[in-house]
Image (tube, rainbow, N blue to C red):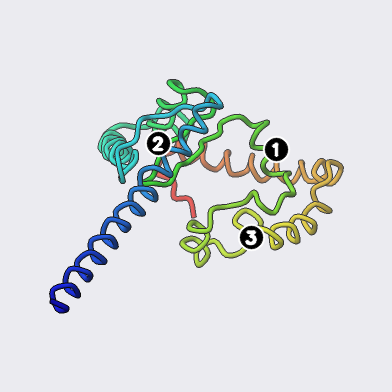
Amino acid sequence: MKLEFDSQFFISVVFLGFVGLLCYLYTLLVEKPNRLRSKLMKQGINGPTPTILLGNILELKKSQCATSKSSSSETPSSHNCAALVLPLFDKWRDQYGQVFMFSLGTIQILCVNQPDIVREFTVCTSLDLGKPPYQLKQLRPLVGKGIIYSNGAEWVHQRKILALELYMEKVKGMMNIISESAVSVLNLWSSRTEAEGGVADIKID
């Protein structure tokens, strides 16, 4: 009798644990992303409908495959690199506006194409507004700890150092150097293109 009671108790505990795990996974993978998307939609921010667990990854994969096939056979006629590499973003921007959202798995991404809003982000001194930690872990060996990829107190420290060199008067003083360098590179590319009959392969390091 006692053995039967113990086995029933063990089965009940395992069942409750399994149900609890399912509830936790549902909340983490489905309910939490949907709740975040709902909050953004209430603010007028829309985006493509994601699939469960994968988000919009399949759409991005299809778009990249189509882009790679077309780019290998055609010469680009536009200098809009973003549209050439990720044309799906241009389509979403036309469909949903300058600010839209999409999903990479269960992660919700907010895409902002308005310079004024981006400027507010970059000059914000709040330690809470920064780069996602999952990106920092992946990219840190490649990009280091510069201001573009820094976060929190590290970002504030670097910004204070750089701000002294980025006053408008100092930037104006560097315009001649910047323009001379850009013009020399453009002239080199132009002469090389003319020498090769109007089309040239240029390797950019």
Q: Are marks 3 and 2 in contact (CB under 8 Å)?
A: no
Q: Name which of mark 3 and mark 1 comes first in the sequence.
A: 1
Q: Secondary structure at mark 3?
A: loop
Q: Residue at x 67, y 41 (%)?
A: 121
Mark 1 is surrounded, within 10 Å at the Cα level, by few (under 14), some (14 to 19) or many (20 or more) other residues, namely few
Q: Which residue is mark 3?
A: 146
The residue nearer to you, when weighing 66 against 4, is 4
Q: Secondary structure at mark 1?
A: helix
Q: Residue at x 57, y 52 (%)?
A: 131
Residue furthest bottom as drawn: 3
Residue furthest right as drawn: 169
Q: Amino acid at mark 2?
A: Leu
Residue 60 on image: x %, y %? 33, 39
Q: Which residue is mark 2?
A: 86
Q: Amino acid at mark 3?
A: Gly
Residue furthest top as drawn: 95
In the displayed structure, 134 sits above or below 107; it is below
Residue furthest front as drawn: 1
Q: Residue at x 70, y 40 (%)?
A: 179
Q: Is residue 11 left or right of residue 187?
A: left
Disc 3 from disc 1: Cα separation: 19 Å
The residue nearer to you, when weighing 132 against 2, is 2
Disc 1 from disc 2: Cα separation: 25 Å
1 or 2: mark nearer the eye? 1
Q: Residue at x 31, y 46 (%)?
A: 53
Q: Amino acid at mark 1?
A: Glu
Q: Which residue is mark 1?
A: 120
The residue nearer to you, when weighing 95 against 202, is 95
Placement of the N terminus among the 4 image quadrants: bottom left
